[in-house]
Amino acid sequence: MKKVYLFATCLGSAIMQESVLSAVRLLRREGVEVIFKKQQTCCSQPSFNSGYFKESKNIALYNIKLFDKDYPIIVPSGSCAGMMSHDYLELFKDDENYALVKEFSSRVIDLSQYLDDVLKVEYEDKGEPLKVTWHSNCHALRIQKCINASKNLIKKLKNVELAPLEFEEECCGFGGTFAVKEPQISDAMVREKIKDIQNTGAKYVLSSDGGCLMNIVGTMQKMGLDIKGMHLYSFLNKRLEGAMI
């Protein structure tokens, strides 16, 4: 039996627990044993993006020590996966711990890539016909490069129509601390993203990034729109279990 670590992410642990549980279920249905470390914490992306490199290194070294066995580290977020698999290498490029970090980063993989590229899953869609659209978060698109794998998983669902966004690669305005530091610009950006979502006629917008979903869904609710947002892995799990969506 394959064994993997699951890195839940901060938002997964704090407000999107269903997406974490769905990730576990998707792995278990493929016969994978999931190891969850209760002591896990942040990937260090917020501090890294804010210029706190020393503090980010401390967090990274904590994670390396915690996930010590030679198992893949599965991350249900392209943003956090990109930080741990790629940005850690930049953070430690002139550090004595670089070799240790490189070994750790080589084991980090986004969940969609693990399901699609490694396990090569096949899915039986038990849901009713539904049109959805997809938001590509910036880090998943440009750093982890896992968007194709995520879309491939959706395309395995025979009753789901995936409608493309015209401006799919444009940021939704979240950007972590950017949304706090520049709220007016962030709000303008997310509203442009929502216009694009509305133009597809989709009933659901999917993403594998909790921060983007929080930003987009929160704004759609304020606008009173009848469009739902859902984390990719929660969506997949519901379609496979025949839930009513």
Image (tube, grey):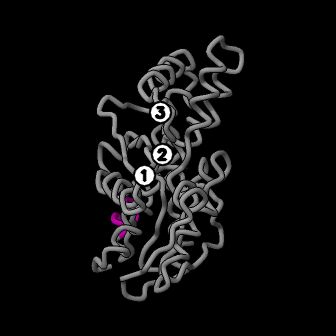
Of labels 2 and 1, the one closer to you: 2
Amino acid identity at mark 3: Cys
Q: Which residues are magenta?
A: 217-223
Measured as percent of width and height from the top left, residue 102 is found at 64, 27
Measured as percent of width and height from the top left, residue 147 is found at 61, 60
Q: Secondary structure at mark 1?
A: helix
Residue at position x 52%, y 83% from top? 161
Q: Is residue 192 visible?
A: no
Q: Earlier in the sequence, mark 2 or mark 1?
A: 2
Amino acid identity at mark 1: Gly
Residue where numbered disc 1 is placed: 210
Q: Is residue 141 visible?
A: yes
Amino acid identity at mark 2: Ile
Q: Earlier in the sequence, mark 3 or mark 2?
A: 3
Measured as percent of width and height from the top left, residue 40 is found at 36, 31
Q: Residues within 10 Å of mark 2 (few under 14, many from 20)?
A: many
